[in-house]
Image (tube, helix red, strand yellow):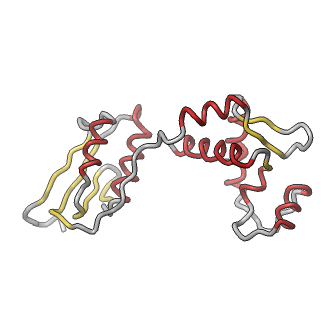
Amino acid sequence: MQNHFLKEMVLETLADAGTITREVFFTGYAASYRNARRMMLHGVSAHRVDTKAKMSFANTLSKLRREGLVEQSKRHSGAWSITAKGKAWLAAHRGKRLPQFAPTAEKDYLKIVIFDIPELHKAKRQWLRNTIAGLGFSMLQKSVWIGEQKLPVGFMEDLNALGLESYVHIFAVAKRGTIL
């Protein structure tokens, strides 16, 4: 899921900007034109960027190039642009991210969310973890979460739509004992 998000972000940026260099992704918000140009032309960085992040990004660009979604400029070796195939992919996948929910201030019974989602549905499992964490639940174990927030109706609908209802169990605790 993370890779899909990064792929979509890179393609959207290239579609909006035309041809850009890899360094544009690593200049800070307040970077001056002068610093950005220096990075582009000479590879000199005004700010040190995490090497691991640069390598991950370079790998993503390389993968997108192999898939035919982006191409490297013939004039400037560090410049990249989106291809027609990349624009088609972006049009087909734009907005197809898994749903997100905002946390509610409304308290309810203490709830325990337990799930055992197969490795085949790894992206959906990560979506579930991110969503329940975003709703204010705390992790007891990787697949056991606890919280008092009210779960949105849309959350339950999305569990069913994603086919996760048989893997997720939600318990409401009406009377507290030794758990907390």
In percent of width and height, residue 150 lies at 22, 60
Residue at x-position 39% and y-position 46%: 99
Who's the residue at 25% across and 62% down the image?
147
Residue 90: x, y in percent?
Answer: 60, 36
Q: Where is residue 146? Give x, y as percent.
A: 25, 59
Image-based side of 180 in relation to 125, left or right: left
Is 178 located above or below residue 67 in the figure?
A: below
Q: Quadrant of residue 132?
A: bottom left
Quarter of the figure with the C terminus: bottom left
Up-down: is 113 above or below 124?
below
Point out residue 16 in the picture as x, y percentages from the top left corner: 69, 47
Tell whether 38 sits left or right of 114. right
Instruction: Classify residue 178 by image quadrant.
Output: bottom left
| Front residue of 78 and 170 | 78
Q: Is residue 48 above or below residue 1?
A: below
Count of picture labels? 0
In percent of the image, x 68 and y 35: which residue is there?
63
- Residue occupying the far left of the picture: 175
Q: Residue at x 66, y 42 (%)?
A: 11
